[in-house]
Amino acid sequence: MSEIDAYNPRVHWFAVLTAIATLGLIGVGGVVTSQGVGMAVPDWPNTYGYNMFFFPFSQWVGGILWEHSHRLFASGVGLLTLILSIWLFGRRGRLFLRYFFSPLCGIGALVAYTMEEPRMQDALFLGSLFVISLIVSFIWPRCERSRPLLRWMGVIALLGVIAQGVLGGLRVTLFADQIGIFHAALAQLFLIFMCSIALITSKWWNRLRVKGYEALKSRFIGCGLVFLTVMTFGQLVLGASMRHQHAGLAVAEFPLVAYGKVWPATDEASLAKLNQGRIDHRDFNPITKNHVTLHMAHRLMAMTLFILAAVFVSLSIRSLPRGHALGSGLIVWFSAICLQALLGAATVWSNKAADIATLHVVFGAVTLALGTLLSIIAVRLAHPVSSRASVSAEPFVDLASVSKRSTPGMA
Amino acid sequence: MNKVYSRVLAGVLLSGLSISTFGGDITGKITLKGTQPKEKKLPLDVLCSKARAATGATGIATTRFYVTDENGGLGEVFVSLKSVPGDYEVPATPAVMDQVGCEYTPYILGVQVGQKIVVKNSDNVLHNVHPTPRVKGNPESNRAQLPKGKDLDFVYNNAEKFLRFKCDVHPWMFAYVNVVDHPYFAVSATDGTYTIKNVPAGDYEIQAIHRKAHAPKYVGLTQKITVGADGATADFVVDITK
C-alpha cells in the first residue's frame, strides 16, 4: 500500500475541526471590526502587560472582551494548525516535538526566567509547553505520514497561521488600518487552505479518484468555478477594505440610493449632508468620496457575481448527469451566495448592526470556502485519471483501522 | 532739543503700537438652522453605568453630536482666527481632558501647537486612550489607563483640526482636540456663545467649524472681521437644511 493513498480519519476530522475553528475565528474577528474595538488592547503579544493566557478574567470588559477573545481564539487555531501540520508527518512528528519544539520552548522559558527583569508568566507558559510537548512526543500517534502535497500544505498552513498572527499584532502596534485589510484577506485564504486540507485528507477524496464520479466532459465547470471563486475572493477583499475604513454605511440605502437615484452623489454638498446625519455611537470617520466609490464597487461586484453565478449554475447543472454530486454542491454554493447577498442588504437596512454585519462576513467566508472546494473537485474531475494515477490507484484503506489492528491504542 | 524730540517720537510710536497691539475680545453666538438628527443612546455596560451613576448624572446617556439649547444656540463649535502670523509662546498650563462616567469631558477642546494635553481618568474603570491624528508628524499612540490611574500626557507639534481621542474599550467614548498655532480660539458653550480673549487689533478672518455639520473637510463658516479697542462680534448660523 502506498502511503500516498492512506486515509486517516483522525487526521481528516482534525483538519475539519481546524477549518471550523478558523471559520469561528473569522466570526470573532468580524465582531471585533463591527464593534470597532480592534485597538481595545493596546499591546501585543501581551495583553495590558500580562502574558495573554494570564490576563485576569475580571478585566475582560467592553471591547477588551472581544479583542482578547479574538487573540485567544487565534492562539487556539494556531495550536490546532501546529498539531495538524505535525500530524501530517505521521510518526516522525514525535522527533520534531522531542528534539525541536520542546527544547525550543525550554530555552524560551529559561531566557524569560533569567532576564534582568524575569518574565515569570512567559517562563511559566513556555515551561508548561516544554513539559507538555515532551510528554506528547512519547504518546504521539505512530501513523504513516501523509502524501508530500499534504505535508507541504501543512507546513504552509503553519507558516500562514504564524504570519496571520504577526499581521494581527502589527496592525495593533503599528496603528495601520491597511494591515487590518491584509489580515482579513489572509484569514480568508487560510480558511480555504484548511478546507482544502480537510477535503484532500477525506475518504471521499480518495473515492473520487479511485472509484470516480463521472468525469466532466468539458472544462467549463472547473474554469467557471475557479473564475467565480477568485471573483468571490476579490469581493471579500473589497468588503474588508470597506469594513476597515468603516464605509459600510457610506451609502445608507438599498437597493436604490438617496432620492431614488441609482448612483449616489459625491459632490461636497451631498457628502456634507450625508455626514451631518451620520449619527452612530461609534462615530466612525466622516464619509468621503472614496468611501462611497468603494461601497458602490462592493455592491456592483456583488450584483455581477450574483448574476454570473446564477447563469453559471444553471448552465452547469444542465450539463451534468442527473444526480451528479457536483450538481448538489453547486446548488448549495449558489444558495450561500443568495443568503450572502441578502445579508449584505440586511447589513445596510439594519444600520450595520454588529451581529448582522458579522454574519455577512462569516457567510462570505463560507461562500468562498464552498467555491474553493467545488473548484478543486471540478478541476480534478475535469482531468481524466492519468496513467500514473491509474497505476497508483488502489482502493482506499482506512489507515486508522490498520493501525488499530497492528498497534492497539496508536492511531 | 534732540532729547525732547526723541521722547515725543517714542511716545507717538508707543501709543501707535498700543492701538495696533491691544485690541479686545471677539464674542458671538453660533445658531443651528434646521432640525438636528436624533442622538443615539450609548450602549453603556454595567461598569460604565455604575461609573455614570457615581457622577450623579441622570437620564439616558446619548451621543453629543449636536449640543443645542432651547433658543437654537449650538454648542461644541470650534471658533478660531485663520492665518494669524507670528510666533506665540506655548502656554505652560496644560489643557485637561477627563474621563467621567465613561465619557470624555470636554468633548471638544482647543490647544496650541506644543501645548501639553493631560488626560485624566476619574472613573473606576479601565480605559485606553487612543488619539488618531491624520496630520503627518502628529504621532498616533494607544495607552492603557488604569481605573483612577495616573494622568497621561500628549503633545502635538502640528496644527490639526478635530484630532480624535477615543477609547476602544468603550467604543462610544470620543473627544476631539483642535491643535492651532496661535492662542486665538474658543469652543462655543451650550447656548452657542463664545469669547476669544485679548485679540490684537486688526483685520482677521474668523472661522467656525462644527465637527459633524462640517465634516469631512472642516472648512466650516468664515467671516472677515475688524477687531478694534472694543473687540468685535461675529455670529454664525450653521445651516443643516441644505
Image (cartoon, rainbow, N blue to C red):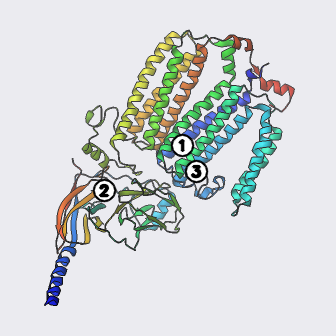
Label 2 belongs to which residue? B66
- Which part of the image, by quadrant, shows the C terminus of chain A? top right
Q: Nearer the viewer, mark 2 or mark 1?
A: 1
Kind of residue sitting beneath label 1 = Gly
Label 3 belongs to which residue? A68
Say which residue appears at 53% left-offset and 65% top-offset: B147
Q: Position of residue A356 (x, y in %)?
A: 46, 39
Label 1 belongs to which residue? A29
Say which residue appears at 68% left-offset and 30% top-offset: A152
Q: Position of residue A332 (x, y in %)?
A: 53, 23
Secondary structure beneath label 2: loop
Crowd band around label 3 with a 10 angstrom C-alpha radius: few (<14), some (14–19), many (20+) = many
Q: Nearer the viewer, mark 3 or mark 2?
A: 3
Q: CA distance from mark 3 to mark 2?
A: 34 Å
Q: Quadrant of residue B1?
A: bottom left
Q: Please state which of residues A18 and B208 is positioned toward the viewer in this rendering.
A: B208
Q: Check the residue under mark 2 and report the chain it is in.
A: B
Q: Please state which of residues A359 and B196 is positioned toward the viewer in this rendering.
A: B196
Above/below status of B191 relative to A127: below
Determine which of the numbered discs, if any, sits on residue A405 in the image: none
Crowd band around label 2 with a 10 angstrom C-alpha radius: few (<14), some (14–19), many (20+) = many
Kind of residue sitting beneath label 2 = Tyr
Q: Please state which of residues B107 and B8 is positioned toward the viewer in this rendering.
A: B8
Kind of residue sitting beneath label 3 = His
Say which residue appears at 40% left-offset and 33% top-offset: A298
A386 relative position to A407: left or right: left
